[in-house]
Amino acid sequence: MVEQTQVIVVGAGPVGLMVAGELRLGGAEVIVLEQRTEISEESRASTLHARTMEIFDARGLLDDLGAPANEQMGHFGGIPLDLTVESRFSGLWKVPQTRTEELLCSWTTALGADLRRGWRVSAVRDDGDGVVVTAEADGRTRLLRAAFVVGADGTDSTVRELLGAECVGESATRELLRADVVGIEIRPRRFERLERGFAVAARNPAGVTRLMVHRYGCSVGARSGEPSFAEVVRTWHEVTGEDIGRGRALWVNAFDDTSRLLREYRTGRVFFVGDAAHQQMPSGGQALNLGLQDAVNLGWKLAVGLDGTADELLDSYHGERHAVGSRILANIRVQTELLLGGPQVESLRRILGELIAQEQVRAHLAGMISGVDIRYPAEPGSHPWLGSRLPDLPRVAATAAATPREGRAVMLGFRHERVAELRTAVRPWSHRVEVVSAGPDDRVGDDALLVRPDGYVVWAGSEDETPSAGLRRWFGAPRSVN
Ligand SMILES: Cc1cc2nc3c(=O)[nH]c(=O)nc-3n(C[C@H](O)[C@H](O)[C@H](O)COP(=O)(O)OP(=O)(O)OC[C@H]3O[C@@H](n4cnc5c(N)ncnc54)[C@H](O)[C@@H]3O)c2cc1C
């Protein structure tokens, strides 16, 4: 028997969970297949950036996150960088990845996603009209069919492998060893560059010290599994001269500087998100944040695309997110060079440090790392916000916040007389778009703004301009209204 659904998400890491929640908000039936039986307890990403926090806020997820520590000071390749941006969520927020996954898991399942743990996907076949997925669970082989599949199955993506989707970029040449250690005092080190290598040590409130160490010039070892703690102890000693052998490792791993991007984020009816689409060194928490924002870009588009009238919209996922991924991977490669390069990068670091001291350069890098400077290709028009996220101006954002919780787009009307007209124009898309009267606002400049469910402004109009073309472009064919 082949089980039918609308969308299958392969992988319930943070990105798969996020895309499943977004699909449910868009009204799609979703099955999530995950090979693990439990949420991973691995020590992985620990940072959420401003744009991700804005999205979590729009979805009403922040109350359950508690009060994570917030810091304005981040880094660019180890050079201190003030991450202050124009956002209520400026800076970086310390949230262990396990916590993010628990939060997204509760949200997604409460919205009705059918999450199946212990299901391992072994085959994927796109027959043009749909995709058949084979999964192994409880010692049995199951078949499922959906209109679309999302490959959210991480850096060693099975879906990518099965479809032969091509990744391009650079293979690893260097690696960083990492360990979470208890039972020993280790002097804190923030991106310390020493004669022989680079070392970081930061103790968290629970008394666990996270170490990272790299010996300059040391290439990637041939590994069949994670490194041993003895290897970390040896490298730490070579780089810092300190003996940490009396400590006990809770976790040890190695990550390298692979930098690869899928050539196409879409293969027919299969879409890739998160680490399945891009492999990068997890510098400054960008890997996780990049993936979560892929998910929020794709989820609503797939839900709209289920009626078969929005192929161009579906293609815009690759157009928008591949460009963002490519830019982030470029900044990560520069940072990797600055961090892991030996004495030969000292002059570069010095000059870059001088540049970062200039406000324009600081703001440019902070905007890129925090994700608030993203600008997608937009409709023709001169409004300065077209293609950008709706700025986090308190009143405009508060008015718009009424609907993103339900994942709907918002048509904001800034002139009372115009709102009735907008309601009439939007009625054929009222299942996707909510008209909200936002009152006059000098900073907006136009009478009306159309904001997508992921928060980006895609249309701005005055007086006699009708939004119909924009609505059709972004939300598919109109529904007939009586
Ligand atoms: C050791 C390590 C340290 C890291 N440190 C940082 C950091 O400090 N900062 C940072 O930003 N990022 C870090 N990352 C990266 C970050 O964890 C990832 O970017 C993030 O997890 C990506 O989420 P994802 O959902 O795309 O993939 P994943 O979290 O990898 O989730 C993929 C899911 O798919 C499942 N899956 C795979 N194959 C199948 C299959 N065939 N069938 C069913 N399910 C399948 C997996 O079990 C997994 O649950 C680190 C990663 C690692 C491995």
Image (cartoon, rainbow, N blue to C red):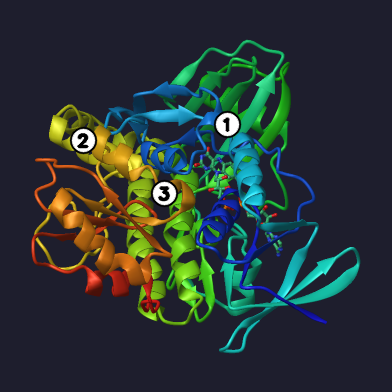
In this view, which residue lies farthest toward the front? 482
The mark that comes first in sequence, 2 or 1, is 1
The spot of residue 298 in percent (x, y) is: 46, 63
In the picture shown, does residue 340 fall above or below 327? above
The mark that comes first in sequence, 3 or 1, is 1
Label 2: which secondary element: helix
Q: Which residue is mark 3?
A: 404
Q: Which mark is residue 64?
A: 1
Q: Amino acid at mark 2?
A: Ala
Closer to viewer: mark 2 or mark 1: 1
Q: Can residue 407 be seen from the camera position used here? A: yes
Q: Could you tell me which residue is drawn at 36 percent across and 69 percent down? A: 429
Q: Could you tell me which residue is drawn at 19 percent across and 42 percent down? A: 439
Q: CA distance from mark 2 to mark 1?
A: 30 Å
In the picture shown, does residue 227 fall above or below 236? below
> Neighbour class for label 3 at 10 Å: few (<14), some, many (≥20)?
many
Q: CA distance from mark 3 to mark 2?
A: 28 Å
The spot of residue 220 in percent (x, y) is: 56, 49
Q: Which mark is residue 363?
A: 2
The spot of residue 426 in percent (x, y) is: 30, 66
The quarter of the displayed image where residue 97 is located = top right
Of residue 21 and residue 92, the one placed in the foreground of this image is 21
> Neighbour class for label 2 at 10 Å: few (<14), some, many (≥20)?
some
